[in-house]
Image (cartoon, rainbow, N blue to C red):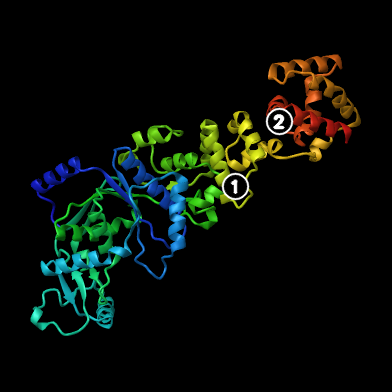
Amino acid sequence: MPDATPIAVMERLISLMSDQVVTRFAPSPTGYLHIGGARTALFNWLYARGRGGKFLLRIEDTDRARSTPEATQAILQGLSWLGLDWDGDPVSQAAGAARHAEVARELLQSGRAYKCFATQDEIEAFREASRAAGHSTLYRSPWRDADPSSHPDAPFVIRIKAPLEGETIIRDEVQGEVRIRNDQLDDMILLRSDGTPVYMLAVVVDDHDMGVTHVIRGDDHLNNAARQMMIYEAMGWNVPVWAHIPLIHGPDGKKLSKRHGALGAQEYQAMGYPAAGMRNYLARLGWSHGDDEYFTDAQAKEWFDLGGIGKSPARLDLKKLENLCGLHMAQMDDAALLHELRAYLIAAGQSDLTEGQSEHLAASLYCLKSAAKTFPQLIEKAEFALTSRPISPDEKASKQLTDVSRGILRELTPQLQNASWKRDDLEAAMGTFAEAHEMGFGKLAGPLRAALAGRAVTPSVFDMMLILGRDESIARIEDAAAA
């Protein structure tokens, strides 16, 4: 395909400058939302949102045998969990079949496509002969320039007339300039003999009709760009800006697979990663803004550009993901954090919190959320606030409840009943009590942890007492003292 003329280039630049940025995510509903697809959706979302543009969603459901409503729902739920909102309603590619076929017939009428009556047996015979002779197996149809009067009354496909000479140049924002010899491109089928359009045609027509200005997708589609450009050029449509991003690999450098762990976006939700941390990590997975690792959504939208995407495959690093999630949890609004934690419980198939548990957990977030990196870790640290009496101490905590320590707890109870339930007053009362018994506070803290939480490792004793309140705290200490 020859290079565009200077006038055409100028028209394209003017068009791109005047048009609103429109990106799209176009998954096939044949399974869950793959983590690589989630990153592709995120890149499209960030690029559009950061420029006041539109982010569209198209469900490429033309493979009716494999597409399922359940898979479509899983994709929508995965995007919603990640917080990637799209503009308008999701578009069904299958619903546009008549429009796709219309474009194929339009190309046929304009002489940019032709009817091919070759049978599958004839095509296979041609390829076998070419292989035997050591020639290219790229099929060249004898019907390309045939006189219409010679057309038989038989089934046919519609093929596009691919350029025979020169090069097709893909100017990619990530991969750079990619050149493909036109003699390596076949006359691609646009419409099958049963009148159904092929995927390659449907993608181009949909992207054009949806006004997509930037196609950001995996680099496994790079070769498709050259074939799709034939349709854009034949129809006289503006070619979108291409950005083909490398795929995600596992820690071992090999293509991401089940052996590396979870592949679906919702699996990460069920594992307890907060969505904000996941967005941060996925944005950083193959894209960079200087040395910045942690950033907010607002910063990501402002900073994200196609030039920051690397050419090499990114490697999944769950430790880095966990660390970023911890930073985001520490900064989250308490109400939003509690809401997302409850959504995690549902995704993980666990019971929701009771009203009392929610109140206690909400009250404890101030001292817990900076110490956890995932929701399971947060729940583990908040166990003292979620459990109810009687408290069953674990093995380590039980060792703190000796006859001596129980006696100390019995003596401490009246002091606590008369104390003002404020941190400074509780610390003063405990300090006075420990000093009167000639012991360090550490000797007192162990039995108190066992009584309040049933654990040897807990948040601060004072934090637990303030969160549980006077009545519950004293009741737990009395239970332990009397056991």
Q: In the rendered view of the protein, which quadrant contains the N terminus? A: bottom left
Name the residue at 36% across, 41% down: 46
Q: Position of residue 288 (x, y in %)?
A: 39, 37
Left or right side of 377 for 197 = left
Q: Which mark is residue 345?
A: 1
Residue at the spot of label 2: 468
Left or right side of 373 for 314 = left
Query: Which residue of the protein is positioned furthest toward the bottom in this rendering?
Result: 153
Up the image or down, 141 lies above or below 43; here it is below
User: What is the crowding at mark 2: few (fewer than 14 residues within 10 Å), some, or many (at least 20)?
Assistant: many
Viewer-closest of 2 and 82? 82
Q: Residue 122 carries which label?
A: none
- Label whose residue precedes the other's in the sequence (1 or 2): 1
Query: Which residue of the protein is positioned furthest toward the right in this rendering?
Result: 403
Q: Where is residue 109 in the image (x, y as percent from the top left)?
A: 11, 69
Name the residue at 71% across, 24% down: 462
Q: Which amino acid does label 1 sit on?
A: Leu
